[in-house]
Each structure stands twice: as C-alpha cells, then as structure tokens.
Amino acid sequence: METIIGIDLGTTNSLCSVFQDGKPVLIPNPHGSMLTPSVVAILDDGRVVVGQAARELQVTRPEAAVACFKRWMGTDHKVSLQGKSFTPVELSSFVLKALKEDAEAFLKKPIEAAVITVPAYFNDHQRKATKQAGEMAGLKVRRIINEPTAAALTYGFHDRNAEKMILVVDLGGGTFDVTLMEIFEGTLEIVSTAGESMLGGEDFTDRIVATVLKKEGLALEVAEVRSPLRVSRLRQECELAKRGLATESTVRIRLPDDHGTYDESRAVKLDRAAFAKIVEPLMERIKRPITRAMQDGQREAKEIDEVILVGGATRMSVMQECVQQIFGKQGLIKYNPDEVVALGAAVQAALILDHADVREMVMTDVCPFTLGISIAKEFGTRIESGYFNPIIHRNTTIPVSREEVVCTLIDNQPEIIVKVYQGEARKVVDNVFLGELQVKDIPRQPAGAEIMIRFTYDLNGLLEVEAYVPSSNRKFSTVLTNHAATLSKFELEQAIRNLQRLKFYPRDDLENQRLLRYAERMVGEVNRFQREQLEYAVDRFLNAMVDSERESFASARQDLLITLEQLGISYDGQSEDEKP
Ligand code: AMP
C-alpha cells in the first residue's frame, strides 16, 4: 500500500508523521527528536546542513545559517549563504528533503508522497511555493492542508463521537490562525477561520530583544547590522527568557557584548507584568482574528465548548490569560501543541488513502479569505477602476466553484484582462494580487457583451480561473502562476537539477555535527581558563572528523564529551529547545 507521510513545515521547527497501527505517530530525526529545527546552514566546504546542527551554527556563525524562511514563502526574497543565493522555496525543500530521509530511515522504504500543512492564512503564492518546495524535495504533494484544520483533525480523530463547538487557537513561530469547528456524528466541519501570516511567537521574542537593546541605547535594526553576533546571542537569551516566563514569574537575561561573550555581572530582569506590557501591541493583534472568526461563524463566546491551544507560543501566560478573558474558560492543551499539527497531517493522509480506521470520518474545510477580481465602477458619467469584486467569499466551504458575469465597457472591445486578487479590502490595491487571465478575440459588438468568469478553489486551497465568451464560444483558463515566486514547470525542473548538484551532510552523521557546533558555542560561554581546555578538545574532535581513523575519532569524541562534563556543561543529546 502507498505510504503518505504528514509534514508540519513550521517556521521554527518541522515535524514528520505517518498513520501506523490505526493511529498517527511522529517520526524521529537522527537525534531521536521529533522536532527538526527549520534552519539551514552551509558549511565552509559547501555542504548543506539542516536541523539542530544548523541551529547551533546560527548562533556562532549567523552569516552561514538561516532560519524563519517560511515567512518569505511566496515572495521574491533571496538569502545569501557562503556566497550562494537561495530562495525560500529551496531552503524549505532542504528541510523537506531531510524529513523525507528521516521517514525513509524510520519506515525502511522509499517515500514519495506527503501531506504538507500551511497556515490557514497562507495565500495562493505561499501555498504554491510550499507545493513546489515539496516537489523539489522529491515529494508528490498529495494535499496542502491548513494547520489549524490539521490540529482539529487530531482532536477530531480522538474525539470522533463528541458533539461540540471548538475554537482552535494556533500561535506558531511566525503565524497566527484561529479556527472555529463543529464536531457532530463523526463529521468535522470547519465553520470559519481567520488569522495573520506575519504574527507569531518570534515577534514576542523580537519585542524583548528590541526592548533590551533600547535600554542600552541601541535600535534593533542598527545592532543587527553592526554586531550580528551580539544580537543573535541576545536573541537566544530572550527566547529562553520568554519560555522561562511560561513557568516562572521572573527571569534573568544575560547581556552579551559585541563579540557575543557573556559577563555574568551584566544582566537584566524581566517579570510577567513587564513582559505583558512589552507585548501589548501584539496582543491587540491577536484579539482581532479571534473576534473575526467568531463573527464569521455567527457564534458567541459562551457557545464555545472548548478552546484548544496549538503552537508552541500558546504556552505563554499572556496567551492563556487572553483566552480566559474572552471565553471565561481555560484554554486546553490536551495534546502536545508542538505535535498536534503534524499528527493531523497523518490523519489527513489516512483519509486520502481511505484507511479503514478513518472510514467513518468526514471533514469539511473553508476558504480562509475572499477571492475576486478587479472591476471598474460607474459613478454618473465617470468610470473608476480598481474596485474589488468578490467571487468566492471568505469562509465558504471548499471545494467550491462560483461564476460571475462581467461586461465589456466600450463598443468593439477586443479583450479583457481579468485581474485576480485575494483579500478583504474594497479597493484592489489593498489586497494581494494573485495573477491575471487574458481574454482575447472578443467578437466586435456593442459595449455590455457578457463574459462569464468562473473561480474554482480546490481542497489544496489552489485557485483556478476560467473565462467563457458566449459570443465566440471560447474558453480561457489558468491556474495562476503569474508571479516571480512561483516557477513554471521548466523552471521547476531546472531548479531540481541545480539542487541535485548540492551535497548534503549525511543525516546519520548529524549528531557529530551537532556536538561540534554545541561545543563551539560553549567555547564562548566558559571563562578563559576553561576556554583553553575546551578549545583543545574541540580542535581535536574537528580534526578527527575530517581525516581520522574510526578508533581515534571515537576517542576524540569521548574526550570532548568528558571535557564538557568536567566543565559542568551538560550535553545530553538534547538542545535547550527540545527539552520538555
Ligand atoms: P511552532 O512553530 O508551533 O513550533 O512554535 C514555535 C514558537 O513557540 C516559537 O516562537 C517558540 O519560541 C514558541 N515557544 C515554544 N515553547 C515555548 C514556551 N514554553 N513558552 C513560550 N513560547 C514558546
């Protein structure tokens, strides 16, 4: 039987899953962890490293590594690493390739298909970019599903016989989604969804970083250029502080100098109240999509049976207080918020494969935003163009196909350019331009000739636009690709060929890379006497990695581990991020 893996391609971490023995399970990476940091680094020898080892590199050599590239999906943004330029699609494909390899090692067979999750608020470009990243990684993308829908699927799968109204609040590293869902008789109906694709846990960390730097008389943007090492180290401290505040009432933030070195005497304190004040503007933005999803679904707070918290950043006390304040009840974390989306992707894969264990389940999803075209409006004798005419309204159940009639404006008008937009604004300039369709050779006739425009929005959230000209009986159609960030079939093949030339660091040897990066980072943390000892052990390990025999490599590795232990530095095979 074909195997389809589920992938949660996250801003900060990615996870891989599969439906096995009647339930969704997570697939571990070579370090035995379920979370693979969505970080890519290029080593000096040009090899690509993905995951925890890349994250370690990001701290010590910020110029060689990149994270959070999910935020640029669907844009023309490029990232330069070690003199080579990469698109966000390519960087994402490296992560997907790593997950695919981990799944192959775990399942002991080649894997060719996947369900990949995206934030509900991802637009058409971002979804296509994700699909292409999958193809570049050698995966047939069988379905793109919304992250909160995937989270809802996990809850729905385990709670199939319930009857309830649930609100899923999903705050990940870089995106925020809210989804209202009803479960009844094995049917999971997504009622409405709302969100922001540029708001996530990382913004909360950024606010702390900016506040700390401001106290030191520095603007974040300036500091990032002048002393990137200081900012990357401080960011790491602030990330720990933010996480610490989920359980502690006060945390300490050490202040690194320009070389990224800490002096224990330089630190500031942050308590929950101060943190809440710092992130107040972000919390205002968090409340808006919650209100919108409730309004669109025509439900009131008291009708919600459960508020489910998904995404690592919902662990922040400010998020839990916000839910309590709006709904008068605590947000529920029944399943690990980091894992629930990936698990849902595996349930979706089982639904596609018509697995016996999900046969009685039905799921319906909605289109998260309004799709329409640009039209001209007549104001007396004046005609003004640039108005948005919705064709598929947000929160319509998908798949959906809707038709709209437009007319020629002048006599003998030979063509119409249908400009397609996504968004909620009245004027198209304030919405996202998705592409255009040229309708040509309209027969000569007086103004007012009718042309039918049909929008079809599929289960993947991809849009097809068709136009039909009755007077010529001609049809025009396009799956929108009119954007630099989405590649044509030829360009995609070319990109795949280029990527095949890149060398990847072997996944099963990543543990050594990670140990090396971790130890290198610790060199900057210890005092100068310890530094000498640690540096010696690191150099020996590095040499052994490059050209040594098996035995001397094993002894160099052991030596490094012992040195770390002697210096009181714990290395338990888990990074700070993976610790529960
Ligand atoms: P995700 O994309 O769902 O993996 O979410 C990652 C985000 O969750 C990052 O911004 C993390 O900083 C944040 N996060 C993870 N654990 C915690 C925690 N204990 N407290 C606060 N934020 C957290």
Image (spheres, rainbow, N blue to C red):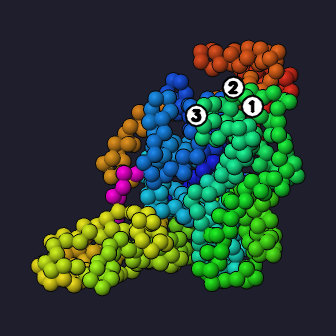
Residue sitting at x 35%, y 62% = 435
Q: Which mark is residue 73?
A: none
Q: Magenta segment: does it hold 243?
A: no
> Which comes sooner in the sequence, label 1 or label 3?
3
- Which is more toward the observer, 118 or 428? 428
Which residues lie in the magenta part? 479-485
Left-right relation of 347 to 278: left
Is 132 above or below relative to 195? Answer: above
Q: Earlier in the sequence, mark 3 or mark 2?
A: 3
Mark 1–mark 3 contact, CB under 8 Å?
no
Secondary structure of the residue carrying tag 3 is helix
What residue is disc 2 on?
Answer: 259
Q: Is residue 346 visible?
A: no
* Left or right relative to 209: residue 484: left
- Compute the Cα span from label 1 to label 3: 16 Å
Q: CA distance from mark 2 to mark 1?
A: 7 Å
Count of all numbered marks drawn on residues in the image: 3
Dot 1 amino acid type: Pro
Q: Position of residue 566 (x, y in %)?
A: 86, 22
The answer to which of 301 and 117 lies nearer the viewer is: 301
Residue at label 1?
Answer: 256
In the picture as drawn, the residue positioned furthest to the left comes out as 444
> Which residue: 67% across, 47% down?
206
Residue at image mark 3: 225
Q: Distance of mark 3 from mark 2, alpha carbons?
A: 13 Å
Q: Is residue 33 above or below residue 363?
A: above
